[in-house]
Image: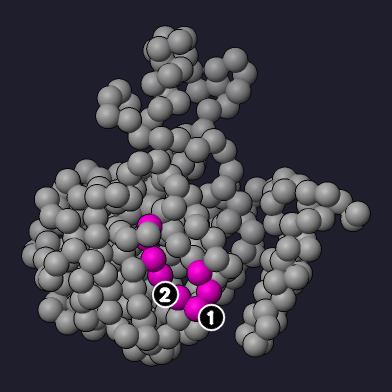
């Protein structure tokens, strides 16, 4: 499939600001998948202690329960259902939309943030186009014609973070069939490797894209499960961990916020309005203001001392 997004898809602009999308996916408890019961550790534990009625109650003990519909990225990826195409979807978005079931992007209009062919095959170009725009869906194609990608629920910032994200996943289109999604396993840890000067990466070895060399590597099993594909790599081509040549790489992000993100008020340890934008304003310089970044974190933790 070579459905390049040469369509009038608008370039995204930061709506509500970076912190709204970042806070949306950071809020609430972290959950872990289990092999039995509902697939959610907390739900299964509450059921065992308080019974099924407590789980059925939307506000047990007066506390409103977090729902998948409102906070989809607090649960492992949905593997058995596809998202419905939106009227605003054009070009390849009509195909890629399918993998976004049970994600914060499922019902939002998407815009093309980065296209390697148009904006440049470099990590610098990639980060200049996607950093701070929140959750993103990457779609790429190998020289052999294999279409694949990954979902990043936290988005990119380029500050060297190894981000936890239980809902992150990889995917690949197998022939003309439905996309096969490869979920995060072993808990939420190290789901996304977000480093300045490097391309997009899922886990230490799940999927690593080197934009400068126009190549990708994949090894499944440790951080992203391979049961659905029954092979140790996202690619049919080559061996696990072997470099595969790429034909295209693109990233789509939301052009709007969910209602929850619009109305969410961050706590004292989260980014306040304008903070992250302020320390990122000089990021294109040779020496990004990392002192400002750590200075803000220090003030959040220890005050002005």
The quadrant the C terminus occupies is bottom right
Rendering quarter of residue 44 = top left
* Residue that carries the numbered disc 2 in the rendered image: 199
Magenta portion: prevailing SS class: loop
Q: Position of residue 166 (x, y in %)?
A: 41, 45
The quadrant the N terminus occupies is bottom left
Q: Is residue 292 above or below residue 167?
A: below
What residue appears at the point 90 percent right and 55 percent down from the top-left corner?
304
Q: Is residue 198 magenta?
A: yes
- Disc 1 crowd rating (10 Å Cα; few below 14, some 14-19, many 20+) is some
Q: Position of residue 18 (x, y in %)?
A: 62, 64
What residue appears at the point 53 percent right and 80 percent down from the top-left corner?
128
- Can you tell which of label 1 and label 2 is closer to the viewer? 2
Observer-nearest residue: 157 or 266?
Answer: 157
The Cα atoms of the two marked residues, 1 and 2, are separated by 11 Å
- Disc 2 crowd rating (10 Å Cα; few below 14, some 14-19, many 20+) is many
Display coloring: one colour
Q: Which type of secondary structure does the marked residue at label 2 adopt?
A: loop
* Residue that carries the numbered disc 1 in the rendered image: 128
What residue appears at the point 45 percent right and 35 percent down from the top-left corner?
31
Observer-nearest residue: 301 or 92?
Answer: 301
Rendering quarter of residue 186 = top left
Q: Is residue 127 magenta?
A: no
Kindly indicate whether the residue at mark 2 contacts the one at mark 1 (C-beta within 8 angstroms).
no
Observer-nearest residue: 229 or 28?
Answer: 229
Badge 1 or badge 2: first in the primary sequence: 1
Magenta segment, which residues? Answer: 195-203
The disc label shown at residue 230, or none? none
Observer-nearest residue: 108 or 153?
Answer: 153
Q: Is residue 137 above or below residue 78?
A: below
64 horizontally vs 50: left or right? right
Can residue 128 be seen here? The reply is yes
């Amino acid at each position: 499939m070579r459905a390049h997004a040469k369509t009038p898809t608008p370039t995204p602009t930061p709506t509500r600001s970076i912190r709204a999308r970042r806070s949306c996916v950071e809020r609430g408890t972290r959950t872990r998948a289990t092999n039995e019961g509902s697939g959610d550790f907390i739900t299964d534990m509450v059921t065992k202690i308080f019974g099924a009625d407590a789980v059925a109650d939307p506000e047990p003990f007066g506390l409103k329960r977090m729902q998948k519909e409102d906070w989809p990225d607090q649960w492992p990826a949905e593997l058995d259902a596809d998202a419905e195409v939106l009227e605003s979807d054009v070009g390849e978005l009509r195909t890629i939309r399918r993998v976004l079931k049970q994600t914060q992007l499922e019902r939002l209009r998407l815009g093309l943030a980065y296209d390697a062919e148009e904006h440049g095959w470099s990590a610098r170009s990639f980060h200049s186009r996607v950093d701070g725009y929140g959750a993103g869906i990457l779609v790429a194609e190998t020289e052999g014609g294999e279409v694949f990608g990954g979902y990043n629920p936290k988005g990119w910032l380029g500050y060297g973070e190894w981000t936890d994200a239980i809902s992150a996943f990889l995917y690949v289109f197998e022939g003309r069939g439905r996309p096969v999604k490869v979920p995060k396993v072993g808990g939420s840890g190290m789901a996304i490797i977000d480093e300045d000067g490097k391309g997009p990466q899922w886990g230490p070895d799940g999927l690593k894209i080197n934009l400068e060399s126009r190549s990708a590597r994949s090894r499944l099993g440790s951080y992203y499960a391979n049961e659905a594909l029954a092979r140790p790599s996202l690619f049919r081509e080559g061996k696990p961990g072997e470099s595969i040549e790429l034909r295209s790489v693109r990233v789509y992000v939301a052009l709007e916020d969910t209602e929850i993100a619009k109305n969410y008020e961050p706590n004292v340890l989260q980014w306040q309005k304008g903070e992250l934008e302020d320390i990122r304003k000089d990021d294109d310089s040779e020496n990004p203001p990392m002192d400002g970044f750590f200075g803000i974190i220090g003030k959040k933790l220890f005050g002005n001392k």
